[in-house]
Image: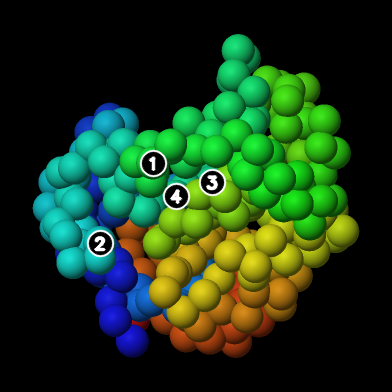
Amino acid sequence: MKTLLQIENLCVKSKEKQILKGLTLKIGKGETHIIMGPNGAGKSTLLNAILNNPAYEKTEGKIIFDGADITDKKTDEIARMGVFMSFQNPQEIEGISTFNFIKSAKQKRTNNPINYFELSEELEENATYLQMNQGLLTRDLNVGFSGGEKKKNEILQLLELNPKLAILDETDSGLDVDAINIVSKGINAYKNEDNAILLVTHSSKMLEKLKPDFVHILVDGQIVATGGTQLLDEVLKNGYKNFKKGV
């Protein structure tokens, strides 16, 4: 399987606090990887570091995406290369509709003009697939949306932008069982042999639906264990106390 993302000895700090401490990870095309770990372990830091969020400073290591070094590239350049990130708490943005936001993002992603009517039809189909109220498409992005609507909207963007790598930060957070099923269905619809998923989650229900290839345990800024879904069983039974740094 061809490598899509390779992270080598990544060290990251924020506000002088060292968070990631030599993290290494490789993701191949067609793979789904899950990151789990206790609060403060560095899970969200890792996701933000891949997209070079300026709030996080890389002090060592490098990130290779689809054969290109993106360690020091700007966030918008990385996004245009095909990296997508959904957020645990999606922001509300007044003054731009969901439709226009996706239209603008898709145009910048493809560098091609977007046909209004074709995009409208696609969005309506995908919104129906995700059981979203189509009225949300013309409303300001996430403004007044429920938690579940915001998360479905993130997956709607994922399906429309069709990135090479989907980075999903606790997409299941705050969702009930029905919403988790719908969001999982959308993620599975995105998956194919040419793209990949990196997902932070604590939901056994979501793991059951997504059937990940690898589960990684992140503790104190390092991946200390990698395996299959049996790692989730251990976490659910014993928490993270049995995972020691350096295992």
Judge by depth and name the residue closer to the eye, 88 or 183.
183
With respect to residue 161, does 8 lie above or below?
A: below
CA neighbours of label 2 inside 10 A, class few (<14), some (14 to 19), many (20+): many
Q: Are marks 1 and 4 in contact (CB under 8 Å)?
A: no
Q: Give the mark, 1 or 4, whose residue is nearer the N terminus.
A: 4
Q: Residue 83: x and y, percent?
A: 38, 52
Distance (Cα) linking label 2 and label 4: 12 Å
Distance from label 3 to label 1 (Cα)?
23 Å
Residue labelled with disc 3: 86
> Residue at position x 38%, y 46% from top?
110
Q: CA distance from mark 2 to mark 3?
A: 18 Å
Label 4 Cα neighbours within 10 Å, binned few <14 / some 14-19 / many ≥20 = many
Q: Which percent across, then down, holds residue 178?
A: 87, 58
What amino acid type should be assigned to the residue bearing mark 4? Answer: Phe
> How was this image coloured?
rainbow
Q: Nearer the viewer, residue 191 or 24?
A: 191
Q: How many marks?
A: 4
Task: Specify the label residue 65 is tagged with.
Answer: 2
Q: Amino acid at mark 3?
A: Ser
Residue wearing tag 1: 112
Q: Say whether disc 2 or disc 4 marks the residue closer to the N-terminus.
A: 2
173 with respect to 109 (left or right) = right
Q: Is mark 2 in CB contact (under 8 Å) with mark 4? A: no
Which residue shows up at 68% across the image and 20% down it?
Answer: 140
Rendering coords of residue 92 (x, y %): 62, 23
Reading the image, the residue beneath label 4 is 84
Which secondary structure, mark 2?
Answer: strand
